[in-house]
Amino acid sequence: MRKQQLISSLSHILSSPIEYLKGVGPQRAELLKKELQIFTFGDLLEHYPLRHIDRTRVTPIAALTPQTEFAQVAGVLLDVETVGQRQGKRLVARLKDSSGILELTWFQGLNWVQKSIETGKSYLVYGRISFYNGQPQIIHPELEALESPQNLTKNFLEPVYSTTEKLKARGLGARQISKLTFQLLSMIRETDVIENIPASLLKQLKLPPRFRSFQQIHFPQSPQEYELAVKRFKFEEFFIAQLRMQLIRSQRHRYSQGVVFDKVGDLFNNFYANHLPFALTNAQKRVIREIRNDTARGKQMNRLLQGDVGSGKTIVAVLVMLLAADNGYQSCLMAPTEILVQQHYATIQSLLEKMDIPVRLLTGSTRTAERKKILKALEEGEIKILIGTHAVIEEVVQFKNLGIVIIDEQHRFGVAQRARLWKKATIPPHVLVMTATPIPRTLAMTAYGDLDYSVIDELPPGRKPITTLHRYESDRSRVMDFLKAEIEKGRQVYIIFPLIEESDKLDYENLMQGYENIKGYFPEPRYWISMVHGRQPADQKEMNMKRFVEGDTQIMVSTTVIEVGVNVPNASVMVIESTEKFGLSQLHQLRGRVGRGAEQSYCILLSGSRLGKDAFERIRIMTSTGNGFEIAEKDLELRGPGEIDGTRQSGALNFKLASIVQDRPILEVAKNTASTLLEKDPDLLSAENLQLKNFLQQQKSGVLWSKIS
Ligand code: ADP
Ligand code: MG
């Protein structure tokens, strides 16, 4: 009685604690929370069935074979008897249909079973088929009287729910969860369920209403109804996630204050007209336009720029920094490693050599005196462009008027880190995150949907596609001969070893052994080898790197520390050792280190002779395409979204039913639907969207509702 009152006194029945559902109680509720994260009535409703048993499919007994796993049989109960003694005591019944006889056996609850069944009556029986002495039998079958009128109206598709051993032991097996859900569904009415998709959209998309979908996803009247309900919820999951992210984005556009870059001035124009070393690709031009559109409007830009390795993101960064300077603002370009920062500094300095604009470098190894000077000059606004490592800039640096922060090669750069940068100026600077890790479109839409998004989908002209070959360990000496021939032609080569963990002793020994082995093929003084790995002190690493960059050494033996961003156009061969140990995206990144010059380049994937299915597939993909986006899509398919490197732990991918890989078409529709809706009604004020707005407000979220309502 008390429970009933409690339930009805809550305005939303679906938010009632699960313990108040009849048949649950406090102890089982604790288990439901722990084991299945079911806290409320609503959570139970969203605990969707794994599959359904088709009650309409009945197998003739004669058709059962030892290969049959589960089956449903209809027949008349011939007899029931108790056999055996004590421990071996059991109940055995025989069920007959027109084709044969099936044995039913119970070891537990004998009294209860005996009372509930009756010989001579018809039953529908379901369970796992086993064979005993050549006879088919079911142990502990599910059993229903056939002629009871209830069966006629009962759903034919019965839900099967995931559960756990602990829950089963507490009487919460799949069947009991089914019963609880059935009971819950009969308690709630249409008005208890907030419809979060506006009626006109449901009609347009031919999707069933939310309440009906709950009914049909659990207890479908037909497979078609079930499919529709599933589709509706998949759409809903994507749609709500898209709305949330697009709201965050549009609110940033509308309410945030941003630095205004509305002038294209002397620096930009002079550089563009006189010092640009090549014509920009159309994709580069488009991206610069997109950035200019954003930054000219006085709203803060938060943009993700994606471009495959070698697509030319650096020049975009340079142009944008000149644009900032033209408008009187400072900019800073950050990269994750010292080597990359050095390289950027060298590149950018030589690009801007003839221009009158102060560029400085700040890293962990900048000397104290120099550092002091730089910090002061930044605070006074003398330095217009700062290039440095993340750590350094995040901590100590103060700017006079920072206009834009460009973050290279780290799309993992999180929200919190970005927020810290905002504090470096009264008006938050624009943020441009550049990455060469291709992100599949579906991931970009879901995990990064709150960012603006640009793509350079075109390589500079004249690049020769890299020839990618797979070779086995047994071909090693021929591979080495090939390297010699390339080096004879004046080229340089990379040889990469896997080092998954910098601290992994085995990998490290493997690398050292590999190095000695390679030295055997390439003796000094004819050949010189650089080696770079994570255990070296920074200055040694840099020295070795520098020698290779300057052409002093012909061979670079390295771990994946070399992976991102490094640019040595004269290097024409990339050899990857133990290829089977690398992921697809990583292989693609490594391959991107070559193919930067005018010569034909090669990527040689060395592997052991025994390859697993996935490793084989990765190698097959690598040798069949050079397109980073295609590779990223495959990587996503092979590994699933949770595993993809750099995916933000944003919760944006935690869908119950929907999969960004398999349900991509639904995702596309959801995205477009959300943006159309927000275009028409950005604050969700119309009567039709009010329910949706309520729904979003009820769920915790990062949306700034205070600014909307
Ligand atoms: P990434 O996008 O991988 O950072 P980079 O900016 O390092 O690529 O550019 C790779 C190489 O391509 C550099 O040597 C750069 O000078 C060159 N490059 C960039 N854009 C063009 C272009 N439009 N035409 C010709 N070469 C270009
Ligand atoms: Mg780069």
Image (cartoon, grey):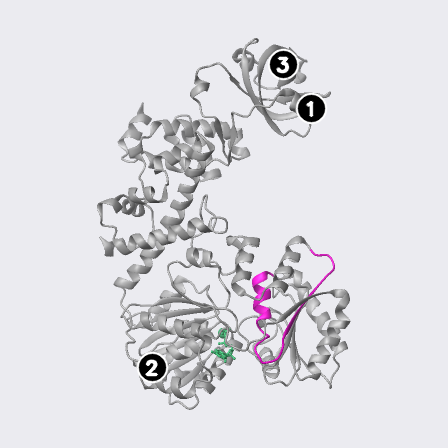
**First in residue order: circle 3 vs circle 1:** 3
Label 1 vs label 2, nearer the camera: 1
Q: Secondary structure at mark 3?
A: strand
Q: Is residue 224 above or below residue 391?
A: above
Report how far apart the C-alphas of labels 2 and 3 lie in the structure. 89 Å
Q: Amino acid at mark 3?
A: Arg
Q: Is residue 317 left or right of residue 600?
A: left
Q: Is residue 158 above or below residue 668?
A: above
Residue 39 in the magenta stretch? The answer is: no
Identify the residue at horizontal 36%, vertical 34% (top origin). Answer: 212
**Quadrant occupied by the N terminus:** top left
Does the beta carbon at disc 1 come under 8 Å from ligand 1? no
Q: Mark 1 highlights which residue? A: 131
Q: Secondary structure at mark 2?
A: helix
Q: Quadrant of residue 136?
A: top right
Estimate how packed mark 1 is, as few (under 14), some (14 to 19) or many (20 or more) residues with alpha carbons within 10 Å. some
Q: Is residue 80 above or below residue 485?
A: above
Q: Which residues are magenta?
A: 583-611
Q: Amino acid at mark 1?
A: Phe
Q: Mark 3 highlights which residue? A: 94
Query: Is residue 395 visible in this depiction of the protein?
Result: no
Q: Mark 2 highlights which residue? A: 325
